[in-house]
Amino acid sequence: MDDFLDELYPEITLETEDIVMTLSIKKDYSQIEDFNKRKEEFIKDLHEFVNEFGQTPESDDFIKYYDF
């Protein structure tokens, strides 16, 4: 099944010193012809994704993982 998803959605791995995150991108950015506008839209969507996640019970559950 993973092979099917790899072909269906492109993936990107983002890495900082503290986090490694692999995302499957469902949105088709090819409709935006201008490179800079396409990049701006993608970054905007990443910000929205993180902000939405921060409002979910899953984000609370994840942070609770570090409770001792």
Image: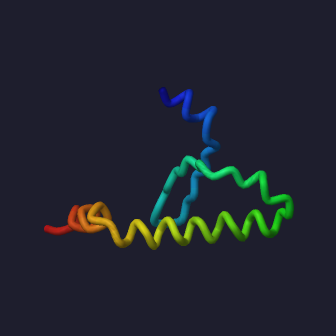
- Tally the marks: 0
Q: Residue at 48% across / 26% down in the picture?
A: 1
Residue 4 to residue 65: above or below: above
Q: Residue at 40% across / 66% down in the picture?
A: 53
The image quarter in which residue 59 lies = bottom left
Colour option used: rainbow
The image quarter in which residue 67 lies = bottom left
Q: Residue furthest right?
A: 34
Question: Nearest the camera: 12 or 34?
Answer: 34
Q: Would you say 27 lies left or right of 50 here?
A: right
Q: Would you say 53 lies left or right of 38 here?
A: left
Residue 32 to residue 68: above or below: above
Residue 15 to residue 1: above or below: below
Question: Nearest the camera: 67 or 60?
Answer: 60
Q: Residue furthest front?
A: 31
Looking at the picture, how far across and down is residue 65, in whole percent? 22, 62
Q: Residue at 57% across / 66% down in the picture?
A: 46
Looking at the picture, how far across and down is residue 63, in whole percent? 27, 67
Looking at the picture, how far across and down is residue 55, in whole percent? 35, 72
Q: Would you say 5 lies left or right of 42 here?
A: left
On-image quarter of the C terminus:
bottom left
Looking at the picture, how far across and down is residue 14, in whole percent? 57, 58
Q: Residue at 81% across / 68% down in the picture?
A: 36
